[in-house]
Amino acid sequence: MRIVPVAGAAAVALLMVLSPLAGASAAWPGAVVSPSYSTSTQGCAALKSASPTWSKGTGVGHWDANSSVKVCKGAGLDDVGLDNDASASFEEEVAVPIHMASGTTGVNVTWGLLGTWTERALEFKPTSCASYGFNDSYYDPYIYSWINYTYSDSDCSLDLGVSLYGYAYLVDTTTGTYYYPNNYWGGLYRDSYRYVDTYYDEENYSNSSYWQDNYTYYGSDGYISGSSGSGIFNAASSPVWWINSTSTFPSTDKWAVVTYIDGDVYADSSGGGKIAGWATLDLTTGSNGYKLGVTEY
């Protein structure tokens, strides 16, 4: 097994497989970085987050987000059913040149993770929900009757989620050949959803000959999926992608590893009453972060 040195530079020890952020610095002076970052807030939701950062000098990146929602308060308007949401997402895409040693048949790529995530529904006791509907009344000359129709629907919800995903592949930049990993990283996908719905549907006729066709439907339903929870990222949960060849990789060619890591945090709610929750992803606090490592074998 061989730790890959940076192409065109002195050999620099990189992150060993399945090691989180500890260990020697992993310098990537020739790296190309393409980060992306987006946020959104509405209503009485709160978001704390910042753009992702990844260092060519250390190979370590950082990102965090904290999204929370609650019902708007004040002026007697607590229960008017306003929508609230806060979300943030990031992606760190990195391409790094590597030198392929003679006799190499495989390369593995890892993001050493150290961090935490949380997803918690604090309350879901809605008292009024965002409502929509319509009334219609028209005269039908064929049956000599007015027809009156009413429909309404209202719903309340709380949706919380955290995700983290990544991928990696190898490129022979001399020949333009791509090599993909033999394994898949499932990442983290957490979502908890609470929902309640109330509906009313009515139609009636003024002509007594058609009163048997009058109807009224109403009711309510709701469901819960997922649950609150929290967890950590460490060596055991860090991704490793194994990229193998049926023969040795040509050492005289130029090579690059392309990899990315992305995350998403969101908290959405609608309706009035006692509805509150929050979701977090922390790859920043203290020694938390994500560190790129590449190893040949």
Image: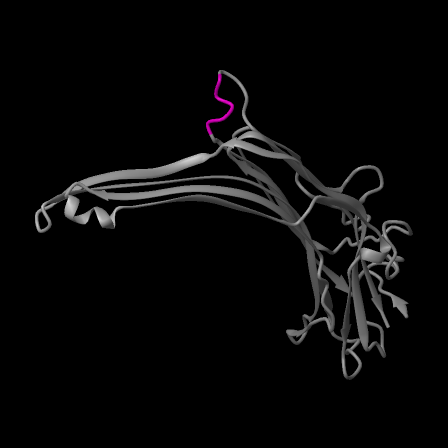
The percent position of residue 245, horizontal first and vertical second, equals 76, 79
Q: Work out whether residue 260 can be spotted.
A: no
The percent position of residue 67, horizontal first and vertical second, equals 64, 36
- Residue 8 found in image quarter: bottom right
Q: Is residue 78 magenta?
A: yes
- Residue 104 found in image quarter: bottom right
Residue 136 against residue 177 in the figure, above or below: above
**Mark count:** 0
What residue is shown at x 20% (from left), y 39% (from top)? 137
What residue is shown at x 46% (from left), y 27% (from top)? 80
Seen as rendered, the residue at the extreme top is: 75
The percent position of residue 222, horizontal first and vertical second, equals 53, 46
Q: Work out whether residue 215 can be spotted.
A: yes
Q: Is residue 150 left or right of residue 169?
A: left
- Residue 184 found in image quarter: bottom right
Give 280 or 78, whichever is nearer the viewer.
78
The percent position of residue 267, horizontal first and vertical second, equals 60, 39
Give 30 or 70, whichever is nearer the viewer.
70
What residue is shown at x 80% (from left), y 57% (from top)? 238
Quadrant where the C terminus sits is bottom right
Q: Is residue 98 magenta?
A: no
What residue is shown at x 89% (from left), y 58% (from top)? 13
- Characterize the magenta stretch by its predominant secondary structure: loop
Seen as rendered, the residue at the extreme bottom is: 247
Give 60 or 282, whichever is nearer the viewer.
282
Residue 101 against residue 10 in the figure, above or below: below
Q: Which residues are magenta?
A: 76-80
